[in-house]
Amino acid sequence: MSGIAKVLLELGYRVSGSDLHTSEATERLNQSGAQVFIGHKAENVQEGVDTVVISSAIPEKNTEIQRAKKLNIPVIQRAEMLSKLMEKQKAICIAGAHGKTTTTSMIASVLEKNNFDPTIVVGGELNDIGGNAKLGRGEYLVAEADESDGSFLKLKPWSTVITNIENDHLDHYGSMDKIIDAFKDFVNLGSPEGFTVLCVDNFFVRQLLEHVPGKLITYGLKEKAHYMAKNIIHHGLGTRAEVYYKEELLGFLELKVPGKHNIINALAAIAVGRELGLTFQEIVEVLKDFQGAQRRFQVLGTVNNILVVDDYAHHPTEIKATLEAARNSHSGRIVVVFQPHRYTRTKFLAEEFAQSFNEADLLILDDIYAAGEKPIPGVSVQNIMDNLPDTVNAKYIKGREAIVEYLLTIVKPGDLVLTLGAGDVWKAGVELLEVISQQENLKASV
């Protein structure tokens, strides 16, 4: 939402909006000329507003939506507004259960650094552009497409990239077949003059192969694909691999971000970049300096040789990939703090979550972050606890303050503390660093 607001401001529109709390995003929008209200109130929607744009998290009964309807102001979804922005540029839309923010960020960085001047709208904060959006005057628009509520079917992509498909958002779709059908429909929205880039490592993505409107490009590690990475080497927080196109070696890819999953994300960026006329070398020169997106294995800091990292991972597959990256990049103990995201996701995936933490030396579970959902009777973090293997050393602690207090008693030099989840669990890592820093400063002054 904040990304679209930023682009609209740069296009010269007057923009106002509401959020429940202040944040870096709201502050940036204020500084850019938007009027941001904290809290949802009917009076925030004033006469003279042409359109109200809402995210999928806003319920129909919201007081601002009701006010807009009373004033006969059109209310549209985020995807509908993003679709309007796509009318003047060729939109490259990246969708998938996991990796879409990083993949979108990599593609955006490759085009930005090679002077394509694209419009960019990303779901997370992209370090390379200092935010989550920018208005470009070039031929292309690069956007992250959110499949969670099906609204990505309202977009107007010229070309599409699908990173993977999984059993997430079952509360909306109801079944895996309906999720796959939605992605088939999304791919078919692409132009016959464009291209479709598919990660064929994923079983469900392979079911899209017969539904591509334009040129098909595939990538992956396991399945035979146009673009493949081999001989992956992990070194500290970086990764290296050989990249092949149709089994011919193109060269070497170096990343400053860890994990096999980021090599896969980079293959998508290489595929898109080459399709748009860039050389392999022009692409990997950008990717070797790619700093990642915020909340994607983001190093929050190091104090007393205790490394604190945060990651947005909130699905079992994402957690496994993040922990694998952590294990490959860190030789010491890994202490995980996980905050489940949404009651519905916990209900559907509790058993899968429980099998995701095998690489953790210690797992701390916090309460579920509701993200606007109402509690579901019988659904709690205990559903995950009850299914954990005996080999996982786990502990339930309620609330950030208690979690930080406990961490202070058990962390030691050489540890990696990893906060995981799409809620506000990252704050525990920030507070832990602050307290340890204060303790170290006191020691130094004595």
Image (cartoon, grey):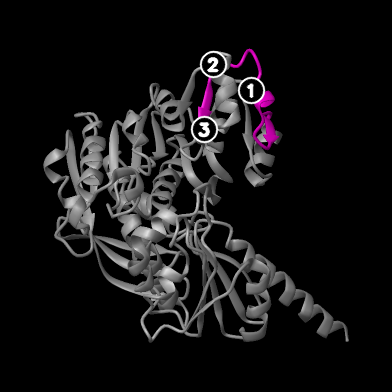
**Mark 1 lies on residue:** 45
Q: Amino acid at mark 3?
A: Ile
**Mark 2 lies on residue:** 73
**Mark 3 lies on residue:** 4
Q: Amino acid at mark 1?
A: Val
Compared across the picture, whether 354 is left or right of 420 comes to: left
Residue 67 vs 351, above or below: the answer is above
Cβ atoms at labels 1 and 2 below 8 Å apart: yes
Residue ID at (21%, 33%): 188
Q: Is label 1 in a helix, a strand or a loop?
A: loop
Mark 1 → mark 3, Cα distance in angstroms = 18 Å
**Magenta span includes 265:** no
Which residue of the protein is positioned furthest toward the left in this rendering?
Answer: 210
Pointer 1 or 3: first along the chain: 3
Residue 3, given in percent of the width and then of the height, sits at 53, 37
Cβ atoms at labels 2 and 3 below 8 Å apart: no
Q: Amino acid at mark 2?
A: Ile
Mark 1 → mark 2, Cα distance in angstroms = 9 Å
Residue stretch in magenta: 33-54
Pointer 1 or 2: first along the chain: 1
Which quadrant holds the C terminus?
bottom right
How many neighbours does mark 2 have within 10 angstroms: few (below 14), some (14-19), or many (20 or more)?
A: some
Residue ID at (23%, 43%): 178
Residue 395 vs 122, above or below: the answer is below
In this view, the mark in front (1 or 3): 1
Residue 89, given in percent of the width and then of the height, sits at 38, 26
In this view, the mark in front (2 or 3): 2
Is residue 10 in sight in this rendering?
Answer: no
Residue sitting nearer the eye, 75 or 131: 75
Mark 2 → mark 3, Cα distance in angstroms = 19 Å
